[in-house]
Image: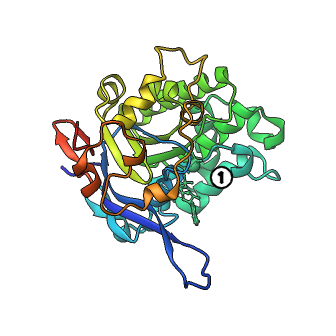
C-alpha cells in the first residue's frame, strides 16, 4: 500500500528581484523526500529561514514545487481535484486566519459549503459537533473572534481545518503564539483529534520541547535540505547528524513549562541564522560552515540521504 503522503525529491526556488545583472533565483528547498504515514504526527524542525513554511505551502498546494512530486495515497497532487478538502493548513496566528466580521458559526459554515456536499439542513449539526470536538460550546458559535481568547480562537481555526474531514493537516507554528499552559491544552486537543479522527499532522515547530511531546516522526531541515528523518524517539534521543546533535545538546530533559526555542539556542551559541551563502553551495554539504567534524569529502559532494532502517541521515560521517 502506498504511504498516505509521499514527498519525492521536491525543490523550490523563488525569483530574486532582477537587477543590472539580470534576474536570478534563490533556492529555498532542495531535493526534499519523506513520507507521512496515516495517523502520524510528523514534526518539522529547523531554524528560522530553513524553509519550513515554504515546505508547508507545497504540501497544501498553495504553491507547487518546480521539481519532484507529492503523492497522496499514491496519486500525484496534480491529479487530485479536491486537494483543498484533503489537505488543510493551520497558521500561527488565528486572529489573522479568521475573519473578524464573521461569527464562529459562519466561519465553520464556509468550508462546509465550499468544499463538501453536506446539505444546508445538516450543516448546523456538523458545525455543533465539530465545535464540541475542539472543546467549544454551542453558544460560542454565535461569538465573533475578538470575543474569544487566543486559545479559543486557535480552537476555531482547528475546527475550520477538521470540519471537512481532511486526510492531512499542516500546522505551521500553530501553538507558538500561545501561553505555555494554553499550548499544552491545544497539543492535547491535537493528540485527541488524531486518536478520534485518524488524520495525519505535519506539525512545524521550532520548540523542541513541544516536538518531544507530540511527534511520532521528526524531519530536521537545514538550509532547505533534509538533514535527518526518522522516529521521534530515535532522532531526539540519539541524533546522528551533527546539526541535530547541536540542537539536542541544548535541550535538557524538560517540561513544557520551559520551552526551548531553536532560534534562541542558535543565537545564544553565536551561530546566528542561516546565510543564503551557506545554502547555495552546490557541490558540498550545506552544513559545512558550521560543522566541526567535516573532512575533505564533505567539501566535495552533497551528502545523499543514507538509509539506516527506519531512519535516514544526510551526513557522510554518521
Ligand atoms: N515568496 C518568497 N520570495 C522570496 N523568498 C522567499 C519567499 N518566501 C520565503 N522566502 C525565503 O525563503 C527562505 C525560507 O523561508 P521560510 O519562511 O520557508 O522559512 P521558515 O523555516 O518557515 O522560517 P521561520 O521559522 O522564520 O518561520 C527565507 O530565506 C525567506 O526569506
Ligand atoms: Mg515559517
Percent coordinates x, y for residue 38 in the rendering: 32, 41
Percent coordinates x, y for residue 86 in the rendering: 44, 55
Q: Quadrant of residue 18?
A: bottom right
Q: Is residue 129 left or right of residue 302?
A: right
Q: Residues within 10 Å of mark 1 (few under 14, many from 20)?
A: some
Residue shown at 51%/27% (left/top)?
210
Residue shown at 54%/27% (left/top)?
187
Q: Compare residues 298 and 122 and report the one nearer the observer.
A: 298
Q: Quadrant of residue 128?
A: top right
Which quadrant, please, contains the C terminus? top left
Residue shown at 59%/41% (left/top)?
158
Percent coordinates x, y for residue 261 in the rendering: 57, 31
Q: In the rendered image, is residue 232 in sight? A: yes
Identify residue for label 1. Answer: 109
Residue shown at 36%/47% (left/top)?
288
Q: In this view, does 157 lie to the left or right of 298?
A: right
Q: In which quarter of the image is residue 118?
A: bottom right
Q: In this view, does 106 lie above or below 83?
A: above
Amino acid at each position: 500500500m502506498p504511504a498516505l503522503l509521499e514527498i519525492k525529491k521536491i525543490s523550490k526556488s523563488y525569483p530574486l528581484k532582477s537587477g543590472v545583472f539580470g534576474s536570478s533565483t534563490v533556492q529555498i528547498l532542495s531535493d526534499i523526500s519523506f513520507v507521512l504515514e496515516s495517523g502520524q504526527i510528523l514534526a518539522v524542525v529547523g531554524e528560522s529561514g530553513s524553509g519550513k513554511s515554504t515546505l508547508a505551502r507545497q504540501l497544501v498546494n498553495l504553491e507547487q514545487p518546480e521539481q519532484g512530486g507529492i503523492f497522496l495515497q499514491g496519486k500525484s497532487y496534480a491529479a487530485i481535484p479536491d486537494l483543498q478538502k484533503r489537505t488543510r493548513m493551520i497558521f500561527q496566528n488565528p486572529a489573522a486566519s479568521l475573519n473578524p466580521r464573521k461569527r464562529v458559526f459562519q466561519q465553520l459554515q464556509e468550508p462546509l459549503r465550499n468544499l463538501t456536499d453536506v446539505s444546508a439542513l445538516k450543516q448546523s449539526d456538523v458545525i455543533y459537533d465539530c465545535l464540541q470536538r475542539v472543546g467549544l460550546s454551542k453558544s460560542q458559535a454565535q461569538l465573533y473572534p475578538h470575543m474569544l481568547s487566543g486559545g479559543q480562537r486557535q480552537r476555531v481555526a482547528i475546527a475550520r481545518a477538521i470540519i471537512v474531514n481532511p486526510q492531512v493537516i499542516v500546522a505551521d507554528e500553530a501553538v507558538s503564539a500561545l501561553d505555555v499552559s494554553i499550548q499544552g491544552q491545544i497539543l492535547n486537543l491535537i493528540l485527541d483529534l488524531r486518536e478520534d479522527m485518524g488524520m495525519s499532522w505535519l506539525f512545524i515547530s521550532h520548540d523542541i520541547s513541544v516536538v518531544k511531546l507530540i511527534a511520532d516522526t521528526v524531519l530536521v531541515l537545514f538550509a532547505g535540505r533534509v538533514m535527518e528523518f526518522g522516529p521521534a524517539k530515535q532522532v531526539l534521543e540519539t541524533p546522528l547528524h551533527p546539526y541535530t546533535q547541536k540542537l539536542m545538546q541544548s535541550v535538557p530533559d524538560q517540561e513544557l513549562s520551559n520551552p526551548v526555542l531553536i532560534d534562541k539556542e542558535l543565537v545564544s551559541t553565536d551561530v546566528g541564522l542561516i546565510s543564503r551563502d551557506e545554502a547555495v553551495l552546490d557541490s558540498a554539504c550545506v552544513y559545512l560552515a558550521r560543522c566541526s567534524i567535516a573532512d575533505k569529502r564533505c567539501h566535495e559532494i552533497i551528502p545523499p540521504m543514507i538509509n539506516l532502517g527506519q531512519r535516514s541521515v544526510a551526513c557522510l560521517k554518521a
